[in-house]
Image: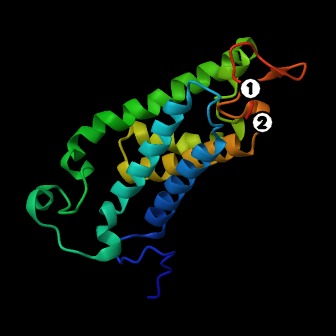
Amino acid sequence: AYEISLGLVSSEMCIRDRLTVISLILAAALLLRSLRPRQDRWNWFWCMVAGFLFFFALEEIDWGQRLGGWETDGLFSQNLQNATNIHNFFNREFSIVYPLAGFGIAIPWIAGLILKDRMEAPWSRLLPHPSIFPIAVPMFIAALVAQQEGFEASFAAFAFLYALRLWRAPDSDRLSRRPKEDGKQVEGSEKEV
């Protein structure tokens, strides 16, 4: 059977795995692109989120092993899938980690949707758009039943769409820019360069 590679050549990787990796890398790039240099003290946080997404993508392709096809040896030969990655040393813990991650995303989102009218601008713009909800539901369900691959794929799609929203947002809604009032920067924010 002919398989579309999308640049990730491996018989082990299905299309879902490939789309997961591509979505995570694009989400990281879009998050970084959404930032404005020297304008917000939260840039470090969003850089860490982008770094986590990129790390997650590299873990999914076993740090290039799926691309290069090299053999696993040394310490990595002892993990669950005999692959060059860290997460396969901790597969048993994912039955706890994934539900926590699902609740860690769902609870603030639902609370934010309920309290959105009372939230100030910097916090309200962090809420995922309601249009992402159809992807979030399978992510929450997969997290609750600890279905690892389903959670990873739906999380990657969620992260991509969330980052795309932030990248496409008007400048006043971007991650690192505080809203302007009457054409002036809000007090405490730096002037544009």
Nearer to us: label 2 or label 1:
1
Residue 193 is left or right of residue 160, and the answer is right
Residue 57 image-quadrant placement: bottom left
Position of 43 relative to 113 (above/below): below
**Residue positioned 47% across, 87% down in the render:** 2
Q: Name the residue tied to disc 2.
A: 171
Q: Is residue 134 visible?
A: no
Q: Name the residue tied to disc 1.
A: 191
Q: Amino acid at mark 1?
A: Lys
Instruction: From the viewer's side, name the closer residue of 1 and 192.
Output: 192
Extreme residue in the bottom direction: 1
Q: Percent x, y for residue 170?
A: 79, 38
Q: Amino acid at mark 2?
A: Asp
Position of 170 relative to 178 (above/below): below
* Between discs 2 and 1, the one toward the N terminus: 2
* Distance of label 2 from label 1 (alpha carbons): 14 Å
Residue 122 is left or right of residue 137, and the answer is right
Instruction: From the viewer's side, name the closer residue of 179 and 60.
Output: 179
